[in-house]
Image: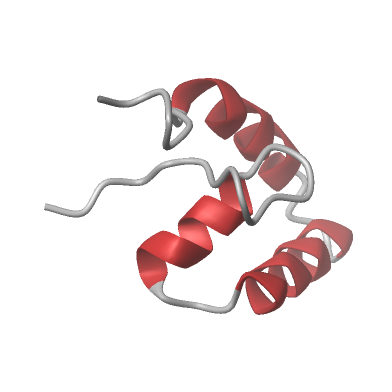
Amino acid sequence: MKKLYRSRSNRMLGGVLGGLAEYSGIDASLLRVLFALAFILGVGTLGLVYIIWIFVVPNREDVI
């Protein structure tokens, strides 16, 4: 079963979108652009979701 982890190698801020890109198979740059556009266009809860994911989703090396 695939699990979602924050990326250590493909990160800009917290590694959440890099990990989500690895999990889903989507290019991380495309995911970041879509996230930024959605945030700018008024989906303001995305910032809060991102911050929560930083604390909830574990780093890849932290998991045994």
Q: Which residue lies at the image location 63% right of the left edge and 70% below the top edge? A: 28
For the residue pair 12 and 30, the one nearer the viewer reads as 12
Residue 53: x, y in percent? Answer: 54, 33
**Which quadrant would residue 24 be assigned to in this image?**
bottom left
Q: Position of residue 7 (x, y in %)?
A: 54, 47
Colouring: secondary structure
Q: Position of residue 56 (x, y in %)?
A: 47, 24
Question: In the figure, is residue 63 to the left or right of 30?
Answer: left
Number of marks in picture: 0
In front: 52, or 54?
54
Q: Quadrant of residue 22?
A: bottom left
Say above or below: 43 vs 44: below
Look at the picture and state if 60 lies above or below 1: above
Q: Position of residue 34 (x, y in %)?
A: 71, 72
Judge by depth and name the residue closer to the eye, 49 or 27.
27
Q: Residue at 84% of width from left, 66% of height from top?
A: 41
Asked if residue 35 lies left or right of residue 61, the reply is: right
Q: Name the residue at the right extreme.
A: 40
Q: Is residue 48 above or below residue 41?
A: above
Q: Quadrant of the C terminus?
A: top left
Left or right, 25 with reference to 16 = left
Task: Report the residue at 41% width, 75% height from top.
Answer: 25
Residue at x 60% of width, y 29% of height = 54
